[in-house]
Image: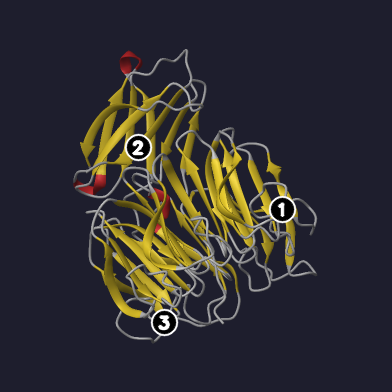
Amino acid sequence: MYKPLSQIHRVAVLTILPALLLLEAINSGAQPGARIAAGYFHSLFLRSDGSLWVMGDNQRGQLGDGATNQSNLPELIVTNRVKAIAGGAYWTLFVRSDGSLWAMGLNGAGQLGDGTYTDHHVSEEVVSSSVTAVAAGGFQSLLLKSDGSLWAMGANAGGELGDGSANPTNRPEQIVSDNVVAIAAGNDHSLFLKSDGSLWAMGNDGFGQLGDGTNSIRYTPEKIIPSNVVTMAAGDGYSAFVESDGSLWTMGLNNNGQLGNGTLNNTNSPQEIVNSNVTTVAVGGGQTLFLKSDGSLWAMGANSLGQLGDGTTDNGNYYTNQPEEIVPNNVIAIAAGEWHSLFLKSDGSLWGMGYDLDGELGDGTASRTVTMPKQIASGLIGYNQLSIQLLSGGKLGLSFVGLVGTNYALDRSLNLSPAHWVPQGTNPAGVGGVLTFTNTPDATTNNFWRVRTVP
């Protein structure tokens, strides 16, 4: 039996006062936060040249190197033009800059979407174009297309595909036709966001992870929050999301304190944990990570293998049920696997903590517990770097570092509920991935900005 995990596709949010400018790099576009990913026992990352690197467990071919031997050092799998990644329990998904979807690893539930139930030890193309984001959960895969449509494949016993049945499928099937902007896949439940900021859920709800106030399976998507959600995460029996005011909310299983509410009690309705300044969240097997707007990394939940990175493996109970600060600044991206955690710093360095016996931390060693953050790699810079300045004449200068040669668009909306995005300009990322947009905001009105990739 293969134990599942979750992988989160996050939405990066930046709020600037006093003019209150919100920059949103949404999952249907650049996905800067999806540059690192944690599977059950393996890890993935992208460098700024678009190359894909992997390490860790490989028993079902999830590293895509043609073998089944684990690797405790980062291994280059694809040399360039990869723009989004996701790690499932024992499989891997990635999207190339042409919008093609590729997959490798475990396929017993059809989660690779190639029409078979056969594992693949090297990557194979599953969809030829238009894919912008991917998410991999327990045994289901989700993908988002450029037209805002949501597609799914794999296991479905808990209704996690949202197609109204409990039948698995080994080919991508359309679940929602439009307006989806972000996706997350948990153990046996799935979440997505629409362009109006609404949060939707489907699948198993035995622990209350859907957050609808019940514990009933939902075989079709159900609206949970009507508006103002900017990012979400789906884990092993629990979920979390962040609202536009920077508040963090959690629901579901809480046996290790992963909800962060000071108890070990499950809840089937969202509970506010932090009231402001949270920008993104990642959840895994039993640990929850989140970032604040000052670049600090916080964590709560299971810690028996050091996955929180606080220097211990317990506080007497092998968990903490309230948020604790792990790193004070400069963290820009996070990922949570089953028993290990990853984060990326603004200098382009990748760090990890937790379980490492299968090499998932990529440090060249094998250890059951790594209790303090350990640097894995450097030079991952070239994305998710935001610089905003008020220029002469009241103009707003926005610098965003992306993938070299990729076209990016800057959009603006006066509101988020509902959002009405108006294109402001399109530029390709030049040498080093740097591009700059210059526009004139109205300082008397709340303005919301997003960066996305375009064909």
> For residue 152, which numbered disc appears in the image?
none
> For residue 451, which numbered disc appears in the image?
2
Name the foreground residue: 318 vs 207: 207
Mark count: 3
- As measured in the structure, the alpha-carbon distance from the residue carrying label 2 to the one carrying label 1 is 31 Å
- As measured in the structure, the alpha-carbon distance from the residue carrying label 3 to the one carrying label 1 is 34 Å
- Quarter of the image holding residue 43? bottom left
Three-letter amino acid code at the position of disc 1? Gly
Nearer-N-terminus badge (2/1): 1
Q: Which of marks 3 and 1 is in front?
A: 3
Helix, strand or loop under label 1: loop
Three-letter amino acid code at the position of disc 3? Arg
Name the foreground residue: 408 vs 362: 408
Q: How is the image coloured?
A: secondary structure
**Residue shown at 64% from the left, 57% from the top:** 217
Helix, strand or loop under label 3: loop
- Quarter of the image holding residue 277? top right
Q: Name the residue under label 3.
A: 60
Residue contact at pointers 2 and 1, CB within 8 angstroms = no
Residue 40, given in percent of the width and then of the height, sits at 51, 72
Helix, strand or loop under label 2: strand
Q: Name the residue under label 1.
A: 260
Residue contact at pointers 3 and 2, CB within 8 angstroms = no
**Residue shown at 38% from the left, 34% from the top:** 450
Three-letter amino acid code at the position of disc 2? Val
